[in-house]
Amino acid sequence: MHVISRKALRQFWEHHPDSETALVRWFKIMQQTEFRSFNELRGVFSSADKVDDWIVFNIGGNKYRLITSIHFNRGKVYIRHVLTHAEYDKGDWKR
């Protein structure tokens, strides 16, 4: 999959250094795997959830949320938000 863009991950872990290992791991798996469907994705990331049009990943033992838009037919993953669990729960990211 082509992940757009790693910069968002890097900016997040600069403020939350304990997230770096988990985010780098997620990025490498996504980059090295061609998922054709949400079901295939769930085979690797069992905690991934669909929330409206977004796919949300639990990162760092459920401490962080990675919100993406994935176009399986084009092999593209767009990173929309990387949030703490508390920021995610506020729901402002849905706007």
Image (cartoon, helix red, strand yellow):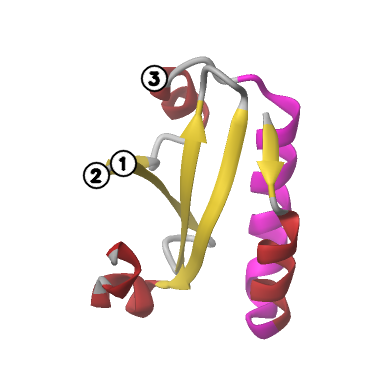
Check disc 2: other Cα within 10 Å, few if <14, some if 14-19, many if 20+: few
Q: Which residues are magenta?
A: 15-34
Q: Residue at x 54, y 62 (%)?
A: 60
First-in-chain label (1 vs 3): 3
Name the foreground residue: 78 vs 40: 78
Q: Secondary structure at mark 1?
A: loop
Q: Residue at x 42, y 28 (%)?
A: 42
Q: Which residue is mark 1?
A: 53
Total marks drawn? 3
Determine the CA span between mark 1 and mark 3: 15 Å
Check disc 1: other Cα within 10 Å, few if <14, some if 14-19, many if 20+: few
Q: Secondary structure at mark 2?
A: loop
- Label placed on residue 39: 3
The residue under label 1 is which amino acid type? Asp
Q: Position of residue 48 (x, y in %)?
A: 39, 41
Badge nearest the viewer, 2 or 3: 2
Determine the CA span between mark 2 and mark 1: 4 Å
Q: Which residue is mark 2?
A: 52
Q: Name the image quarter holding the N terminus.
A: top right
Check disc 3: other Cα within 10 Å, few if <14, some if 14-19, many if 20+: few
Q: Secondary structure at mark 3?
A: helix
Q: Quadrant of residue 94?
A: bottom left
Q: Position of residue 5 (x, y in %)?
A: 70, 53
Q: Are marks 2 and 1 in contact (CB under 8 Å)?
A: yes
Q: Position of residue 3 (x, y in %)?
A: 68, 41
**Is residue 28 found inside the magenta-colored segment of the image?**
yes
- Label placed on residue 19: none
